[in-house]
């Protein structure tokens, strides 16, 4: 992966400080000149980073009062979480990943229901594609047993279901969450009986191909399977430190900036 640009590194640092609580809602950032000097960056790169953060609704400019931090839980979108996950120097914490797992567990039965409710022709096309992916997963399990490859195939399967819903919002959320889902599925494959999981998927898709007599019962069984399959992963995530933390500075210069305490009056 190519080295991130300086504006992107500054953006990553400030985003990480927001998530870790080093910057909180209504905090006022230092004046541009002072902040650039402290970070050891040029003002042009800092301005570019602040523009990115403004577009993401992480900060906003108050006339006559400077740049203030917004409450990301209120103002940011799902892409904010995806961008955070791409900061390799940031450990997002167990609580973050547990929340993601809970969301995906509830969302997948809804996506499957929407997919099934599409036209019969679209459903048959989707079923064929899904069965093809599951077959490739079986082949991968027998040949390499690569958790990464298996996880990539399951994400392809999930994305196929999301696409088949025809719902643009479902698809956009799916796109924004793809990297997080990939990491969670890959870890889960290290913890479960993968063959049993694949056998269950095949059986479910064969039932769908034969026609769903009781949609509610199918969704109930699917939700139960997701919950049971994800339980080992949930147990693992609960052993991680719950809160996010920086393990290194996303700003790659010799200053190793991990907070803005010294210029914001937050030093202990």
Image: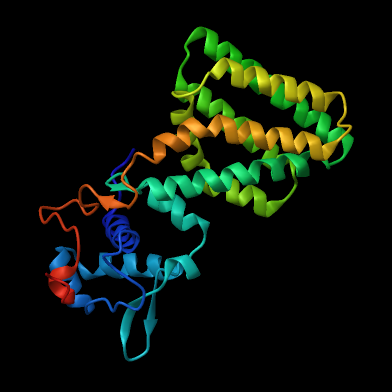
Q: Quadrant of residue 142?
A: top right
- Residue 45, image x and y in percent? 27, 64
Side (left or right) of 2 relative to 192: left
**What quarter of the picture does the N terminus occupy?**
top left
State which quarter of the image contains the C terminus. bottom left
Q: Position of residue 230 (x, y in %)?
A: 53, 33
Residue 60: quadrant of the picture: bottom left
**Looking at the image, how many numbered discs can be counted on the residues?**
0
* 210 lies above or below 75: above
The residue most toward the bottom is: 64
**Residue at left 72%, top 50%?**
167
The residue at 19%/58% (across/down) is: 258
**Residue that protrudes farthest toward the top in the picture:** 143
- Please indicate whether residue 33 sits to the left or right of residue 68 in the image: left
Tell me which colouring the rendered structure shows. Answer: rainbow
Q: Position of residue 73 (x, y in %)?
A: 46, 65
Quadrant hosting residue 209: top right
Residue toward you, 4 or 26: 26
**Residue 166: where, in percent of width, then height?**
75, 47
User: Residue placed at 73% from the left, 37% from the top?
Assistant: 220
> 234 or 152, which is in the foreground?
234
Left or right relative to 109: residue 116: right
């Amino acid at each position: 992966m190519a080295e991130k640009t300086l504006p992107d590194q500054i953006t990553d640092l400030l985003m990480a400080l927001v998530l870790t609580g080093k910057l909180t809602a209504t905090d006022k950032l230092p004046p541009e000149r002072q902040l650039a000097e402290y970070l050891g960056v040029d003002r042009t790169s800092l301005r570019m980073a602040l523009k990115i953060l403004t577009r993401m609704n992480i900060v906003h400019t108050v006339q006559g009062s400077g740049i203030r931090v917004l409450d990301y839980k209120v103002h940011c979108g799902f892409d904010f979480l995806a961008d955070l996950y791409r900061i390799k120097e940031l450990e997002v914490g167990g609580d973050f990943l547990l929340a993601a797992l809970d969301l995906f567990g509830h969302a997948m039965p809804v996506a499957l229901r929407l997919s099934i409710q599409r036209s019969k022709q679209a459903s048959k096309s989707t079923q064929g594609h899904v069965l093809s992916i599951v077959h490739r997963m079986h082949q991968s399990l027998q040949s390499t047993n690569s958790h990464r490859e298996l996880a990539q195939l399951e994400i392809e399967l999930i994305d196929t279901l999301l696409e088949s819903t025809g719902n643009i919002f479902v698809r956009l959320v799916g796109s924004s969450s793809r990297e997080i889902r990939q990491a969670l599925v890959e870890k889960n494959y290290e913890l479960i009986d993968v063959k049993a999981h694949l056998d269950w998927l095949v059986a479910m898709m064969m039932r769908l191909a034969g026609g769903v007599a009781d949609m509610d019962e199918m969704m109930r069984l699917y939700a139960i399977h997701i919950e049971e399959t994800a339980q080992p992963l949930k147990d693992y995530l609960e052993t991680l430190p719950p809160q996010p933390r920086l393990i290194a500075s996303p700003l790659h210069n010799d200053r190793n900036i991990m907070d803005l305490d010294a210029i914001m009056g937050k030093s202990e």
